[in-house]
Amino acid sequence: MIQPPPRYRVVIDTGAAILGSARISSVLSTVAVATALCAFALRQVIGTAGLIAILLSLVVLVAASLAAQWGNIGWRALVPISLMVFTAWAWISIFWSQYQWASLAALSYLLVFTVLGIYIALVRDTIQIVRVFGDVMRFVLVVSIGLEILTGLVFDTSFKALAIAGNLGTADPIQGIFGARNQLGIIAVIALITFATELRTKSLRRGYAIGSLVLAGVVLVLSQSPLAFGTALVVLVASAALYGLRRVPSGRRRYWQFVLIGFVAAVALISWLSRMAIVASFDANGDLSYRLGVWRQLWSLGEIHRLEGWGWIGPWNADLAPFTAFGNFGGRVPGSAHNAYLDVWFQLGLVGFLIFVGLLGLAFMRSWLLASRRRSVVYAWPALVLLVLVISAFAESSLLIEFGWLTFVVCCVKAARELSWRNALDTKPQSSV
């Protein structure tokens, strides 16, 4: 007589089936992206403790869901080695950090978003990831513009809890629920890429997708962010280049890739030589002066620990040395270096900087090659989103925290899953979307 399985075994199997289902994966992915994107607003409304409670709950659920699906995931290509090396060096910096407890807390916070990003990349196909980001971005952009209308036009007041100045009825830029115009502008650019991908792949009704594009375009214009405008222009040129490369015969594609590299290098050189005129054309002299002041002070202090850095801190803490030395620049207390590359150099030294640049370069190269080789247009999404993160990192450090870091991890892991030498060792079939 066959004995029925023990009750606890039935409960475990049922729980694993639920947590490993596609619906739960979709819900957890959506909540993870929404939490990362709305981290500033959540912290303002429910406090840091509330945000951390949400994140820890997410990590527990994500870990359980990942464990339930472990048999369907090729383990050898889980995480890019370059990403592991960078995070390992950041953790090692605790040993010489000038603020060890703060470094431990900041690294734990970074690890949470790293885990969430890895989970999304492993359990969702690329088109599903685009839909997750699209749904969340539609929501936050609608909320942002809605609150701006209420504060700027209806009640003509500010909303201090979310740092909304109520500028919609004036000539000043709006901030949405992100606290700064540059953050809102960069989110709008990523949203444009996402909504355009949904339109091209027909994964969303045409009218709905076009309406989403109009919404993102309006938010971008109202943000009045020079950084976002410049990044959007670069993305537009890169999209045209990708469009051309995808139509070049495969035998000649490598030649045109090198031509494109030469063109980019020439444009970068000309842009650098004409940087003052470009800044003046965007009316960004005030922002540039502020950033230059921060960078000069950062460079001076960074020379003290040039090789290994001061230790990881993520967002700056104005109460800790050496960040107390930055004081007040034009009425503003810096919360970061406003440059992800300098921030990494300052916190992790020259070693960390080189690892970071290699990590970004490898991730972008993989995603770009996939976008130019694969037939589906959905492969252009990681490449163009990474381009936004790489360009915006020259004027903001948001790549290193929360939504910026989670998005980078998603794109990095997804590209590595498709183009990695470890795939040759993996017996599990790789997703084609």
Image (spheres, helix red, strand yellow):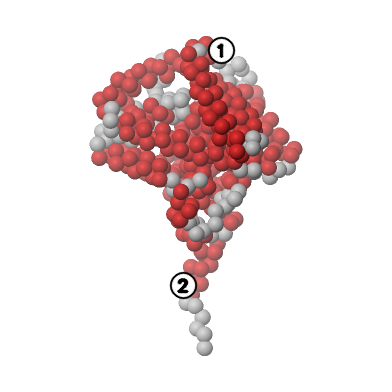
Residue at image x 57%, y 25%?
234
Residue 188, given in percent of the width and then of the height, sits at 59, 31
Out of 93 and 50, give the one closest to the viewer.
Answer: 93
- Mark 2, secondary structure of its residue: helix
Indicate the quadrant where residue 47 lies.
top left
Query: Is 211 situated above or below 231?
Result: below
Looking at the image, residue 142 sits to the left or right of residue 390; the answer is right
Q: Residue furthest front?
A: 251
What is the three-letter code of the residue carrying label 2?
A: Tyr
Residue at image x 61%, y 43%?
374
Residue 381, given in percent of the width and then of the height, sits at 59, 38
Out of 253 and 161, give the one closest to the viewer.
Answer: 253
Task: Identify residue for label 1.
Answer: 281
What is the three-letter code of the residue carrying label 1?
A: Ser
Q: Residue furthest bottom?
A: 1
Residue 60, given in percent of the width and then of the height, sits at 44, 54
Residue 141, given in percent of the width and then of the height, sits at 61, 34
- Mark 1, secondary structure of its residue: helix
Out of 267 and 54, give the one closest to the viewer.
Answer: 267
Task: Identify residue for label 2.
Answer: 8
Going from N to C along the chain, the mark reached first, 2 or 1, is: 2
- Category of crowding for the residue at label 1, using alpha-carbon neighbours closer than 10 angstroms: few (below 14), some (14–19), many (at least 20): few
Q: CA distance from mark 2 to mark 1?
A: 68 Å
